[in-house]
Amino acid sequence: MRVQRQGVSARMDKSIQIGIGQKVRTNLTRLFDGPYALLFVCGLALFYAWDLCTIYCEHAVAAEAYNPVPYFSILVTSAAATAGFVAIGVGLHKLQSFNFVGLIGTVVAGVATVVAALLVQVDGIDAGVVRLVADAIARLGSCWVIVAWGSQYARLDAFRITAYTLISFILALAACLVMLSCPQVLRVAFVAVALPLSMALVLRASRMKLPEHRVVGRETFIGLTWRILLVFFLFGIVTWTSIPWAQASAGVQGLGQLVIVGSGGVVTVLLVLALVTGGAFSQSYIYKVVLPLITAGILLVATLNFETNVGAALISIGYTCFDLFCFALFANACRKTGVDARRVFSWCRAIESSTPFFTVILMVVLEGLLHMGDSLMVNLISGASMLVVVAVIMLDQTDLFEREQLNPAIDYPRAEVLYFARQCEEAIARFGLSPREAEVLSLIVRGRSVPHISQRLFISRSTVKTHISHLYEKLGVSDRQEMIDVIESISLSQANKGDRGTVLLSPRAVPSNAQPLLKGDGRTIPVSPERPTDGVTAEPSLRHPRRPFTR
């Protein structure tokens, strides 16, 4: 009996592994089904690789001039990046040739890196000043790259935004790991060409026609992201409080190796989970992944007093993962709200870039005025920031993307069905479906199989498959789940009133003067007066007529 149970358990484990592998392969094939996929992945990977190399690799320019506690260097680079993002957010995002200007800026940054590497070899030139100037110019050029890629990613659907971001970062980690063992000449060359190449791919991606996934809803960008922006700022202060001392105690390269390997493991697991579930980041990602890493790092730093790099590495890994989450969240929020992605990304990245600047000022004030020691100061700043972070997360019990527009007082199983029916009618009209395609669509979304649809509509199975192919082609999708996602992403507005009757704004907004809906072929869906719509209002609800079924 025990042998039989073990055999059954082994078969179940094998089937689960096969199922997970099949989901991963299916979603990977879905992700790279278009020619734009490699552009988006490789372009963002080049930016992340450049960023990682400038932080964790031994600096390509004037490495011997490294200051163990580089307050001034942090201030200069942070101020330069913040100024660049603010300039883009104020007015430069409106430039019609934004991407081309960014390409010129990144070329200038690459040339500045090469020139600085040559100048430090000349006697009598201050290598530290040359390095600061080169870093400032490079940071200004990088502002254009990340803002441009943010606006491009906002054109994708939520799943692709998440998966492409994770895949890009894994490639960037691999490139940075290779750069750690490369000679300085190759490091200089890579840092010089990474940003221009990434910006060139932005230009190429911006000219490609993608399936339309931008859906403007009722949410505001600030309403979706204000908690994340606050947590982003506080996590940045915690990270930049610990990084300088960790770099001073064990060197940049030692810390970089820990961060790269650790981040690679965490991001790989997240990618597999994303491919298995086919979903996007949710807010629970913060307190299930990021918060434990940073909290563990703070506790280790407080306990060991910088005697090991593990604590600072955990904090850096957590902040790195949170940075990826914020990029994906901002892109998806731009897609959902219809705001200008360039302007939004520039201001959000300005907040991130300003955290080192404010951290250094805070540490200087605490050290100079209150005469706090390094360990006490780091623990105080980290503890206070984490208390605010925990409070913000605990106060928010909703998901950023799911069910945020719903009212808990409404019986939503019925209200959502009603709302989805309206979305189907809108999809029929918006995508120009024929009457027969509309009938096939109504059965597909209810989970009916091809044989059942064939019997129900008295048509052959091959005809049903042809109609389904036409549906996928018109909606710009490749399978049933994507088609349902597209329909659910349709935002209904009262501004759409017209020949098609009243359109619901959301499941909670049932109009009192509900009118019959018109189908795409001109037929009406009558209003039933017998029962309330959603259990809250006593207005009439929609009754959908059923087609008689005969075998």
Image (cartoon, rainbow, N blue to C red):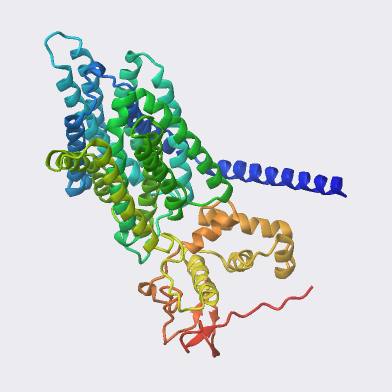
Task: State left or right for residue 412 relative to residue 188.
Answer: right
387 or 302, which lies in front? 302
Does 269 appear above or below 73?
below
Residue 279 seen in the figure: yes
116 or 145, which lies in front? 116
Q: Position of residue 215 (x, y in %)?
A: 40, 59
Q: Position of residue 165 (x, y in %)?
A: 43, 41
For the C terminus, which image quadrant? bottom right
418 or 367, which lies in front? 367
Q: Residue at x 57, y 58 (%)?
A: 471
Residue 441 image-quadrant placement: bottom right
Residue 33 seen in the figure: no
| Residue most extreme to the bottom | 530
**How many numbered marks does the figure carry?**
0
Task: State left or right for residue 118 relative to residue 193.
Answer: left
Does 36 appear above or below 452?
above
Residue 339 image-quadrant placement: bottom left
Q: Residue at x 34, y 19 (%)?
A: 187
| Residue most extreme to the top | 123
Q: Residue at x 55, y 60 (%)?
A: 484
239 or 476, which lies in front? 239
Q: Residue at x 42, y 64 (%)?
A: 397
| Residue most extreme to the right | 1
Q: Position of residue 14 (x, y in %)?
A: 73, 43
Q: Position of residue 101 (x, y in %)?
A: 22, 36
